[in-house]
Amino acid sequence: MVAIELEAVSKRFRLRTILPATTLKTAVVERLLGRRRDGGKRRESAFEALRDVTLTIRQGQTFGIIGRNGSGKSTLLKLMAGIYRPDAGRIRTFGRLAGLLELGAGFHPEFSGRENVFINGIVLGLSKREVRGRFDEIVRFAELEPFIDEPVRTYSSGMYMRLGFSVAIHTDPDILLIDEILSVGDESFRKKCLEKIADFQGRGKTLVLVSHDLPSVAGWCDEVAWLERGAVREQGDPPKVIEAYHRGLAGET
Amino acid sequence: MGALLGELFAYRALIQSLVLRDLKARYRGSVLGFLWTFLNPALLMGTYTLIFSVYMRIQMEHYPAFLMTGLLPWTWFSSSLVVGGTSVVQGGELLKKVFFPPQVLPAVSVLANVVNFLLSLPLLFGFLLIFQIRPGLAVVALLPIVAIQLVLTYGLTLMVSSLTVRYRDVAQLLGNLLTFWFFLSPVVYPAEQVPEPLRPLLMLNPMAPLLMGYQNVFLHNLWPEWTGLAAAAIASMGAMTVGWLVFNHFRWTFAEEV
């Protein structure tokens, strides 16, 4: 059974950051004058973040994605999560998917932990009733019982991350996308998270992991893809791919 | 359009909790609570009464009541557009991290404002009582009037909120436009004051029949003029269609551009 399928997926980003024409006024004026300031040539250049990526991730697999900064790993996760739409190719996912792309996304600082758990849980696809049913467990796991009715702005960054992780993992999706967050909290909390993820794996769920922590990737994953400048350079057995990646890094320096 | 409504329905739990969050955030820590909603129209009412009834000595019966009846729905309209116009940009952090249909964000702004408007109605009834005005059965007509205004407001907010992502000066432009629009709408003057030859100009404005509807219902216990209302309904469907087309055109760029 397939969990995620990518067929010849490409993603481009327009590079517009240095462009002045981001106001309606400029856009209208330029159009009225019938010219663009560079003499008619399109100034928008594109950066190809992913090129022709084809991947199949099976259900129950723990799939690792490695590569240097800027190789397209996070873009790939965002495409899988449906946040970006590919410019070419096709992506299909089967089952409920949750992304730990950033913990506590959408937490509102003025609201209590309790209120944020509800909103965050609903954002991540739970119903209100489901959040209510899991609420105590979420708070207990995050070790925030005494503070749950305090506004989130008073939380330390560790508390914030713990609550975010706890909500996300308790949504119990079929597919979990994780972007470099296996370093939440102190040693004991980290251990709890890893146990939770191992439990998740044990129940035959699918996990996609982006990380620079190669020993972790080797330990957790049963398949790894190495991305290089937006394309899959090598894919397969973790030790083999990681070794190739190391050699690649060494060869370039 | 079906996709728009279908996705909104699928995410109703999210909309509900975000609307509640919006309302709570607005009133938390303020003693007067939702009276704040009433405060801004009340101040405007006082100012216009001073200018037109006292300074300019224009005689009109129950002028403060007339003003209040138009100011409340106008405030709902304009603050929906102003707040909703930046809703996609404001909600950008969320859009970048979790997948959900982005039209939820402007919907939340518009709905939070409609709840505010509805909550202020009892206060309006109390205010009207001071002038011995007792609305009657015609309040039933509020249902279609509010519904049409809701569709109109949401359609325009969809358009503005998506354009604001690409063109950040749209928000400023909107502020100016709304000022013009306000004075071209029959809020501080009754529509009957508009000279006959200029009436068509008034009727090009879908807010005009709506405001006249509120005034008829609240002040005179009269049914609204259905032809005008029907025209407003058609205009609001048009606004919704165009708004959705524009929004849909930009929708997949939001996560990259906010």
Image (cartoon, helix red, strand yellow):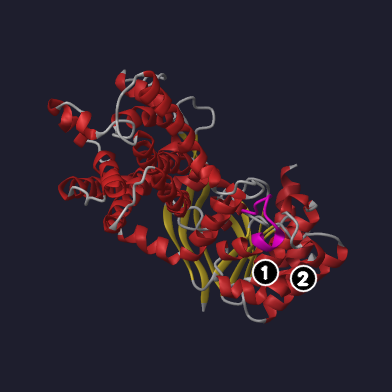
Are there few (<14), some (14-19), or many (20+) residues within 10 Å of tag 1?
some
- Was residue A110 drawn as part of the magenta stretch in this picture? yes
Q: Amino acid at mark 1?
A: Ile
Frontmost residue, B132 versus B206: B132
Query: Percent position (x, y) of residue A229?
Result: 59, 47
Badge number at residue A169: 1
- Was residue B120 drawn as part of the magenta stretch in this picture? no
Of circles 1 and 2, the one toward us is: 2
Disc 2: host chain: A
Q: Would you identify the image quadrant in which residue B63 lies?
A: top left
Query: Percent position (x, y) of residue A138?
Result: 71, 70
Write the residue at 86% across / 60% down: A186
Q: Are marks 1 and 2 in contact (CB under 8 Å)?
A: yes
Q: Residue furthest right?
A: A187
Query: Percent position (x, y) of residue B98?
Result: 56, 57
Q: Would you identify the image quadrant in which residue B46 lies?
A: top left
Q: Which residue is mark 2?
A: A141
First to last magenta residue range: A106-116
Q: Amino acid at mark 2?
A: Phe
Query: Percent position (x, y) of residue B172?
Result: 45, 28
